[in-house]
Amino acid sequence: MTTTPRKRIGLYELTWRLPIIVWQCVFFAGPVLFMVAMSFFLVRNYRMTEAFDFANWERMLTRGFFWDSYLYTVMIAAASTVCAMCIAFPAAYALALRASETTRRWAIFLLIIPFFTSYLVRTFSWFVILSESGVINALLANIGLGPFTMLNTSFGTLVGYMTLTLPLVVILQTVTMANIDRSLIEAARNLGCKPMATIWQVIIPLSKTGLIIAAIFCFILSFGDFVAPFYLGGSQEPTLPILILDTTKSGQQWPRAAVVAIMMMLTLFAIAFAGIALAYRKRKGAK
Amino acid sequence: MNSGRLLNIILGIYVALIFCFVFAPIIFSMIFSFNSQRFPTIPLGDFTIEWYEKIFADADIWEAARNSLIVSSSAAVIATFLGFCTAYSDYRYTFRFKGPYLALILLPPTIPLIIMALAMLAWFSKIGISGQIYSIVIAHSVLTAPFAMAVIRLRLNQMDPDLEAAAWNLGGSEWATMRHVIIPFCKPAIASALFLTAAVSFDEFAVSWFVSGLNKTLPVVILEIVQGNIDPQVNAIGTFVFLISMTLVVLAQIFFASRQLKSIRS
């Protein structure tokens, strides 16, 4: 149901179309564009002055600490994505292809709950559970192991990332695999395909798009999170979000923080576009 | 077939382990909130409501709770209004630049919150609206509008496309049709969107922390307590916040379910 394209836009139509344009231009596009402009501003005597100068870019991009942090953030977000995808897969496989419809619905409903609990509180909870004298080490001590240092390590950071991303990844993978045409899996089995081979050659290729989207979301969430690396990773190796936080909150160096933020956004755009191109690339020979 | 059953059992245990991991921090936080130890471990200490007494006696926390309620309810109303307008525009019209138009509302959740926090802090300071409660309201309405739009758009999908045209043919103006046909049809989705966006706003801390100035919301208070030390009050506040969020989500779910039922009945 569409109106003819060349008609003059009436008041009624404008009433519904305009609010979001105005609101998001002022309060969403505005901030993002201003941040880009701000990356060229200068800070003199702790005051930001409008300018067009590459000083911040030069200062950030020629420093080793920025690139160390950049590399570390990309690596640990990638590690988080690989972990989440691998850990989630068997569970999603079971829920999508082996469980009943009712079980699957309940599982997805339960997995949505964490999104509405405070991520901070969950992180704090992990902090207590993983600490030297925490629950896990107390349990391990009973069987004569430990104590293990889990906080202030990359392991701690990863536990935090998994808390953030795992429910979402399991949900996305489950939904994707549940939508596969079952008859194709049956056909593979009837033709003598072993279960593992079915997974690799039938299920994964058929759910490629959904899997890649799950991975992209997982990467974006891990890449942009400052809570896990800060509280569980001890920010010994600061990730880019921590760099933004420090530069903004303590140094008043907003323009430099803007440079970091823009670099992060460019990275995420590149990864998202590459992922989407990969997801929708047609297979050879397929129309 | 025996190996199939064995595999099912193994997979079942695996799924259970994943759920343990996901729910462990939530459940432990609730347990710790009633535990007398400052550094909770196993074996657990005595049962206590000390931490709850502390937070209920704390004026700052009441203030923050009040701010949180104001912010999440106002942000929910604005976001749902924006979401409804956009969902309806998308449903009813095709127009040039529809892609960028939809991107405008759908993009915010794909940008890391810390970046939105910095961008909004800088822009809000520039145009002189930072550090107020309404600054958080504005920021949250931008961030949550896409969720409202998605919920309402799904509902519009279920509407018979001839319904609107029928109302026009019967002599209703576009405005009357909106009021008497479309809004009543979308009511459950609108209610659902209100609770959903309120719940998302209620838990958001990064952007709130940056733009709020001295007007802290509950998650910002949690953030500041956590920064200082280990304080089980966090668990008590967290349990409290969890109950509020879950109430909102369950309410959203009830409206969602009632909408499904109605569409089956009709």
Image (tube, coloured by chain):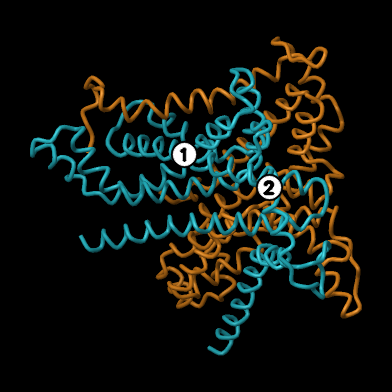
Chain colours: A orange, B cyan
For image coordinates 50% across by 41% down, the residue present is: B144
Look at the image and tell me whether residue A169 can be seen.
no
**Residue placed at 26% from the left, 48% from the top?**
B185
On the rendered structure, is B165 left or right of B133?
left
Viewer-nearest residue: A36 or A186? A36
Name the quadrant containing residue A272: top right
For mark 1, give the secondary structure: helix
Q: Residue A260, located in which quarter of the rendered image? A: top right
Q: Are marks 1 and 2 on the same chain?
A: no
Residue B169, image quadrant: top left
- Residue B250: horizontal and vertical position, in percent? 46, 60
Q: Name the residue under label 2.
A: A222
Tag 2: amino acid: Ser
Relative to A286, is A240 on the left or the right?
A: right
- The percent position of residue A203, horizontal first and vertical second, equals 52, 64
Q: Where is residue B230 in the image (x, y as percent from the top left)?
A: 81, 54
Indicate the chain on which mark 1 is placed: B
Q: Which amino acid does label 1 sit on?
A: Ala
Residue A13: image location, x then y, percent: 27, 27
Q: Image height check: is A150 above or below A249? A: below
Secondary structure under the numbered disc 2 in the rendered image? helix
Asked if marks 1 and 2 touch (Cβ < 8 Å), the reply is no
Q: How crowded is mark 2: few (under 14 residues within 10 Å), some or many (20 or more)?
A: many
- Pick the quarter of the image with the N terminus of chain A: top left
Q: Mark 1 points at which residue?
A: B145
- Packing grade of label 1 (10 A; few <14, some 14-19, many >=20) is many
Q: Considering depth in this image, is B70 or B11 the residue closer to the camera?
A: B70
The chain carrying label 2 is: A
